Image (cartoon, grey):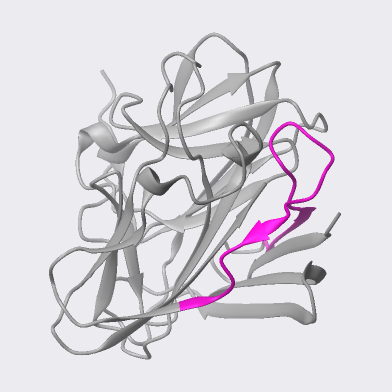
Amino acid sequence: MATTQATISLRSSDLIPSQVLSLTSSKRLLKAGSASEGVDHLDMGRVDIVTGTSFDLIDATALGLGKNNYIYIANKSTSESNFITISHVDRTIIMGRLYGGDFAFFPWSAHDAAHDIEVTAFNGTSTIEYAVFHEGKTLISAS
Amino acid sequence: MATTTATIAINSSDIMSGQVVSLTNSFNLKQAGSKTGVEETTGLGMKVIQTTSSVLVIDDSDDAFGTAGSNYAAKLYMKNTSTSTSQYLTVTVDGDELGRLYGGDFLFIPYKEGADGTTPFDHGSGDVSVAASTSEKLILEYMVFAG
């Protein structure tokens, strides 16, 4: 049983006049419905996403329905014009764009094979770093 | 021009044997394709979710955030402030389930508003809704940052 802690902070002294933004949230990443058992599996990677093709970054079929999966994705491009679009269900559902330097962190249901996490690069190759903290997955049998 | 900084840290000393995991990242939230910082926010909102039916949180149709083009790099923060580890909020994007926020869980995702002419993504992220796993009271915090 692992202990994995995720903490986010959002700060600005001038986005809202006369109101400093200082928001912090921290959470131990737990298995679905558990009060004490932490997620205990991890997949990590760093890949280059070239333009012109959409890629499955994370395969839904190998993860689990009803389990907790937490995904971190960062676009490490240093160009503010390069971005990736994160989508699923064969690009019909768009989460949004990660421009160079941006990151995202979210829970993922992975509830069927159509819900792979897809990425598509625009305006140039983007280097992506990602991690999936999860409860375990079913490995695909070798052919 | 405002400066808004998002920072994340994900740490574990034991999810891998012999290898400490320590992910950290930080960036200033900018308008799409620009060095200019985001200039709009909803502020921190709160909704009481007390139904297993879907409750609209972000309405894609009202073009509420920023201006066309600059708002393609919007960001959405959401948190289930409940302390329950068994009850959760199901988050849907454009009618499709993204994930579940159990008590204390949060998300920080990009959000794109409106069409942009980019095949095959010539539409926005769509509505964002939540539904509770229970009819008991759960509290959702949310905040949008946009160009």
Q: How many marks?
A: 0
Is residue B20 shown in magenta? yes
Quadrant in the picture for residue A84:
top right
Is residue B120 shown in magenta? no
Say which residue appears at 72% left-offset and 42% top-offset. Answer: B31
Say which residue appears at 42% left-offset and 35% top-offset. Answer: B124
Q: Kindly tell me whether residue B138 is visible in this rendering.
A: yes
Say which residue appears at 59% left-offset and 47% top-offset. Answer: B74
Front residue (pair A76, B137): B137
Image side of residue B73 versus residue A106, left or right: right
Say which residue appears at 36% left-offset and 25% top-offset. Answer: A91
Instruction: Work out whether B42 lies above or below A101.
Output: below
Front residue (pair A34, B39): B39
Q: Kindly tell me whether residue A3 is visible in this rendering.
A: no
Residue B33, percent from left and from top: 73, 31
Residue A137, percent from left and from top: 31, 49
Residue A46, percent from left and from top: 65, 35
Quadrant in the picture for residue B57:
bottom left
Front residue (pair A46, A117): A117
Q: Quadrant of the N terminus of chain B?
A: bottom right
Residue B63, percent from left and from top: 46, 45
Instruction: Work out whether A108 lies above or below A10.
Output: above
| Region of the chain picked out in magenta, as a range | B19-45
Image side of residue B29 versus residue B107, left or right: right
Quadrant in the picture for residue B51:
bottom left
Image side of residue A143 versus residue B135, left or right: right
